Image (spheres, rainbow, N blue to C red):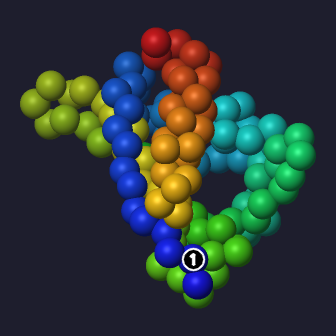
Amino acid sequence: MNDKQKYEMEFPMHVSPSLLYQYISTPSGMSEWYADNVNSRGEFFTFIWSESEEQAKLLSKKNQERIKFRWLEDEGTEFFFELRIQVDEITKDVSLMITDFAEEDEIEEGKMLWENMISELKQILGST
């Protein structure tokens, strides 16, 4: 069994939570920044990149707040990845919280990948 470790990241976003939610929870939104193409059939999502294709199961979804997936290759494990919108009650600042798992020697690479993808998302949303 893989010995993956959980890591979390926070990205300040200058965009409304409802717009951000559309980009993290729908196949069309995720196709713009997360993968080249995203398809969904019920609770299963297929993420397509130029060289590969991965399937994930939708574990949970809370409207305007978060979406959580598990890669099919991680079925039967506690591993998942989650995109969660956090709004500061006082300042109303919006952040996108990422929770993911990776093997210890791949965590930095995973973080860099998320940073690149979120940078692209920010450009699309005009949230730079």
Residue for badge 1: 2
Mark yes or no: residue 52 visible. Answer: yes
User: Circle 1 — which element?
Assistant: loop
Q: With respect to residue 14, does 110 lie above or below?
A: below
Q: Residue at x 58, y 84 (%)?
A: 1
- Which residue type carries mark 1? Asn
Name the residue at the left extreme. Answer: 90
In the image, residue 116 lies at what x, y percent? 58, 29
Which residue occupies the foreground of this view, 104 or 115? 104
Which residue occupies the foreground of this view, 81 or 89? 81
Q: Residue at x 43, y 47 (%)?
A: 98
Question: Is 122 placed left or right of 120 in the picture?
Answer: left
In the image, residue 89 lies at what x, y percent? 14, 36
Q: With respect to residue 9, does 102 lie above or below?
A: below
The image quarter in which residue 120 lies: top right
Q: How crowded is mark 1: few (under 14 residues within 10 Å), some or many (20 or more)?
A: few
The image quarter in which residue 5 lies: bottom left
Q: Which residue is drawn at 83% across and 44% down?
A: 49
Question: Is 49 placed left or right of 122 in the picture?
Answer: right
In the image, residue 26 lies at what x, y percent? 65, 47
Q: Residue at x 71, y 47 (%)?
A: 27
